[in-house]
Structure formats: C-alpha cells, structure tokens
Image: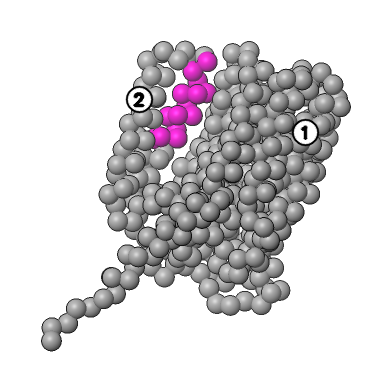
Amino acid sequence: MPETSPRRRMLILAICCMSLLMVSLDTTILNVALPAIRGDLGASVSGLQWTIDAYTVVLASLLMLAGSTADRIGRRRIFQYGLVVFTVASVLCSLAPDLRWLIIFRMLQAVGGTMLNPVAMSIITNTFTEPRERARAIGVWGGVVGISMAAGPIIGGALVEYADWRAVFWINVPIGVAALVLTALFVPESRAPKARRMDPVGQLLVMALLGSLTYAIIEAPAAGWTSPLILACVAVTVVALAGLLTYERRRREPLIELRFFRSAPFSGATVIAVSAFAALGGFLFLNTLYLQDDRGMSALDAGLHLLPMAAMALVCAPLSGRLVGTRGPRLSLVLAGATMTASGLLFTAMDAASSDALLYTAYVLFGIGFGFVNAPVTNTAVSGMPRTQAGVAAAVASTSRQIGQSLGVAVMGALIAAGLHTTAWGVIAGCGAVVLLVGLLTTGRWAAGTAERTASLLAAPAAPKRVVTTTP
C-alpha cells in the first residue's frame, strides 16, 4: 500500500470502523430483541441460541478464508463485497417470515461479515505501519466496539419497544451504503505481494469442527448427551480437529498457519480472545433473558440497565490502546482479567442479581474488563507477524473472537436449560481468570523470545526461493 497522509490514514480508519460499528451493533441490538423474537416467532431457548450462533459459527468458519482471499485479490474489493452482502442480508432478516428463515438470513449476513472486520483490520495494519501509531489506531477500533455496546442495547430497546424487532436490522442499511460509497472514494487497494493458495480441505474441516461442536452443545440439553446424534457430533468434532492439525501441518500454504502458534504472545492472544468473547456472549445472553424475563423489564429498560457496562467499555478501550502503545499489553490484560473475574464472582458469591447496587457494580467491572481486553489481543495478534500475512493473522484473531462468542452463547444456553444459573456465572468468572493468567504468562521476556523466533521462522522460507543456481 502506498504511503498516505495522516489525514487520509485517519479517514481510512474511520471508514473501517464503520463496518465494525455495523457488525457490532447488530450483535448487541439483537440480544435485546431476543425475547421479542421468541414471542413473535415462537422460538425456544435453543432457537434463540441458533439466532446468534448460526451467525457466529459461519463467521468463525470463513474468516480465515476471507482474510487470505483479501490478501490475494485485493482487500478493498473484498471489503466492498462484504458491505453489499451484509447490507442486503440485513434487509432479508427484517423480512424473515419465521425462525428458520431468520436463521438462514443470519447465516448470509455472516458471509458478508467475514469480509468486513478481518479485512478492515488488515487494511488498518497496512495503513498504520508505525507500531505506536498502529496501537493507537487499534485502540480507536476497540473504542468502536464500546460505542456499539453503549448504543446497541438502547437503540435496540427503543426500536423493539416503539417499532418492532425487525427494525433492529434496518439500522445496518444506511451505515452499509455510506461505508460502501466512502470505501470506493478513499480507501486504496492493497494486496499481499505473494498470493496464498486456496485450502478447500482445511476450510471444510474448520466448518465441520465448529458446526458439530456448537450443535452438540446447543442441542444436548434437549436430546441428551448420550443420544446417538450428539455422540455423532462429538465424534465429528474430534475427527475434524485431528484431521485439521495433521493436514494443515503438511501443507505448504495452509488455511491456518500453525507456525503462528509457536509464538507465545500470539497463542496467548488467541486463548484470551476465545475466553473474553465467551464471557461477553454469555454475559449478554444471560442478562438479556434475566432482565426481561425474571425482572419483567421492557426491551428499552433492559438496554438502559446495561448502559453502565457499555459506557465503561467505551471509556476503557481507547485508554487500553494508548496503554498498549506505551507500555505493552501486560497491564491491560491484567486489568481486563481481574475485573472480568470480579464481575463473575459478584454474581456467584454475592448474588449480585439480588441488589441493584451489586448488579451495577458487576456491570461496571465487566465493562472495564472488556474495554481493556480488545486492544492487547488485536495488537499482539498482528504486530509480530509479517505484513504480507496480515490478513491471515488478523483473521485468526477475529476467528478466535467468534469462536468464543459462539461457545459462550451455546454453553450459557445449555446451563440455563439445565437450571444451573449460578454455574453459568461461575463460567464467566472462570473466563476472566483465564484472561488474567494467560495474559501474565504470555507477555514476559520468554514470550517475547518465542515471538522473535517465530517471526524469523516465518520469514526464513522466503529467501531461498529467490536463489538462482547457475553453472560456472
């Protein structure tokens, strides 16, 4: 990508953030609308889980393909395709006649979403090449997630209360159209110098792994963990995982570059992303049903109750970006893990739901934790990797987020169906503890050394290919 002026770089960042705003708003708005969807379409708890997880599973399955494809044929082009598909699918979701069609259109939305956030992050990585400036840009990116968390529940609640749950999808249309026009005008095209080959076998194995795992978790409470269908799904999960690890290791240009995981910071960022977003997915799912079903609140009131959490995420995300840029990722990860753990413990040990003061305290703590976690995860995932593979590295980070959110919703729904509400909050506290411990383990000198060795390993194969042997 050619060098751009500071003003142009900020404009590109703003355009990329528009796609993140659209996708993130869609998640938070939809959570508030779940009880209304259940009432209108007659959905069960598992049906509500599929409304969310059909999107996140498809997203997680295709993100790495989208990232490598964008590196190969052009990041701006793939980004524009994603905007079109996501916007059109949003309109279709608003017209869904029943739950089955809503889930299908959500899957189509996910196909568009795969071409947005990871590709946008790749564009940002290749636009902001100076490490400190890039960390600040990623902090702004994380701040947009906070904005969506703050605005989503309130906007979604208002739309559900004063219009209809279908209106939550309409808001994507003007944002998508505006982003599409601005991208054509101001975002330069970029691609990796060397195109990566397609990996259809690896892609199918990823889809089988995530699909079977999620299906087993969601449907097991109703079907039974020992039912033939669930046991078959578990078997498919195990076989797909084993096949993926074996097959990808032998490929010259795999869908998942397993060598990335030799870097402790990168592996840690992946585990932290899964844990943090599992906590987020579970937190939103639990609280949406609790506030509207158990406490009888309207969608708007429920959205307003979540505002303290969202506001803290909005405030802390840019602070985390600056902190990562000046002091590295460790402090942000420690703060994130400690506060998310404390939030979960307030619900399990002190029954935060019994008191508004404790409830709001738990919301504030979780918002602080989630606000601090995004910037170090994203920056660690992409900063130690070659720029030529920025799309793939960013896609792995984004995939980890979606896997985490899928698992969070699936596990929480299963625990709710089994009547284990306290255990569900304990899982959220456990996710926070994982963020804390892994953050401490993967941000020291030893971890930095593994990152340096991994970067050298990734760069090493490129040199010999250009050597031409001549006969004297």
Measured from the top left, where is residue 15 in percent x and y? 66, 62
Quadrant of the snapshot with the C terminus: bottom left
Give the label on residue 363, or none. 1
Task: Pick out the residue farthest to the left.
Answer: 472
Q: What stretch is highlighted in magenta?
A: 208-221
Q: What residue is rendered at 73% in x and 23% in y?
A: 347
Was residue 67 drawn as part of the magenta stretch in this picture?
no
Task: Pick out the residue farthest to the bottom.
Answer: 472
Give yes or no for contact between labels 2 and 1 (Cβ–Cβ under 8 Å): no
Give the label on residue 136, or none. none
Q: Which residue carries the number 2 mark?
A: 235
Q: Is residue 47 visible?
A: no
Q: Who is closer to the viewer here, 174 or 388?
A: 388
Was residue 220 drawn as part of the magenta stretch in this picture?
yes
- The colour style of the image is one colour
* Amino acid at circle 2: Ala
Image quadrant assignment for residue 72: bottom left
Q: Who is closer to the viewer here, 62 or 453?
A: 453
Q: What residue is rendered at 51% in x and 63% in y?
A: 75
Image quadrant assignment for residue 463: bottom left
- How many numbered discs, if any? 2
Q: What residue is rendered at 50% in x and 51% in y?
A: 447
